[in-house]
Image (cartoon, rainbow, N blue to C red):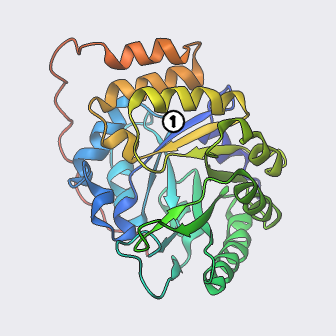
Amino acid sequence: MSASPRMHRLFAQDGRCLVIALDHGIFHETSFVTGMEDIAHAVGQIVKTAPDAMQLAPGQARILQSIPGPRKPALVLRADTTNVYTRPAANVLFSVLMEQAAEQAVALDAAAVVVNLLSVPGHEELHEACLRHIAHLRTQCDRYGMPLMVEPLVMLQAPNGRTMESSLNAQAIAMLTRQAVEMGADLIKADASEDVAEFGRVVEAASGKPVLVRGGATMNADLLLARTASLLQKGAQGLVFGRNILQANQPDQLVAALLSLLHGNGSAEQTQNSVHRPAAGPPPPLPPPVPAVPNPT
């Protein structure tokens, strides 16, 4: 079954997309959920900013899909979880794939599923588990015409010796991206290289598959927009940002600026000015909370 119809829902006519990720709670790290403790409120805020898609875990995807009407962001469904982000770092690392993830994605009307491909020195068993997950999920996705987004992450021990952090080495990211594509990824969600000028190596390794830049650690809005503009020039076709949006001073203006960079003619300087412009008035009230619906079984 072709994945094209769902890919068309995910990407705008210009072939680009902005995905706002709110699946951080599934990784069991307290610092990740700052600004999104009330997940229903956070989803409501983001829906009003009209990104192309939202990335959510199965248990919270119902909040987005319970909102009535056809004009809401597409759903990218998180299909796995891991403990590589916990602080302090765990002695034993794991990755768990959701049961029947592609079927859950169909039931939730998702436009894609996303799964990790983790490489951690000294933890080859974690890499193996991720490869098995991708191989298993690829078969499921083929059955249902569900696009498979793979998130290749090269993780290293942080200088403090107590936590893990992403490697931003372009060669390492590109090599793991190449493996993800050869395993069957339809889309790549990758870290930006530390030297943005080298990000083209990651795009090249993706071999024509769309590359979406992962947000990662928070940074100030000006730097975020400047780096984003450069990454788009290097061939990135989208963004998957989470904490950089939810923990920003003015999330709505930052999303508008990112959408202008992606889909409009806005320059980094113009979008920076729009983020710093004072708000015209108080934000409109959020829509009423949506009723809970049972998760698919």
| Residue at left offset 68%, top offset 52% | 188
The spot of residue 4 in percent (x, y) is 73, 46
Identify which residue, 286 or 67, lies in the foreground: 286
Q: x%, y% of residue 177?
A: 74, 58
Q: Is residue 280 left or right of residue 115?
A: left
Quadrant in which residue 261 is drawn: top right
Q: Is residue 45 above or below residue 76?
A: above
Dot 1: few (<14), some (14–19), or many (≥20) neighbours within 10 Å? many
Q: Position of residue 97 (x, y in %)?
A: 54, 77
Name the quadrant of the N terminus. Answer: bottom right
State the image coordinates of residue 203 (x, y, percent, origin top left).
76, 44
Which quadrant would residue 69 be assigned to in this image?
A: top left
* Residue 68 seen anywhere in this rendered image of the structure: no
Tell which of 163 and 188 is nearer to you: 163
Label 1 element class: loop
Residue 62 appears in view:
yes
Q: Which residue is mark 1?
A: 52
Q: Nearer the viewer, residue 72 or 45?
A: 45
**Residue at left offset 59%, top offset 12%:** 265
Residue 59 higher or lower than 33, as above or below:
below
Left or right: where 97 falls relative to 148:
left
In the picture, the quarter occupied by the C terminus is bottom left
Q: Residue at x 50, y 58 (%)?
A: 77
Q: Amino acid at mark 1?
A: Asp
Rendered view: 284 above or below 71: above
Total marks placed: 1
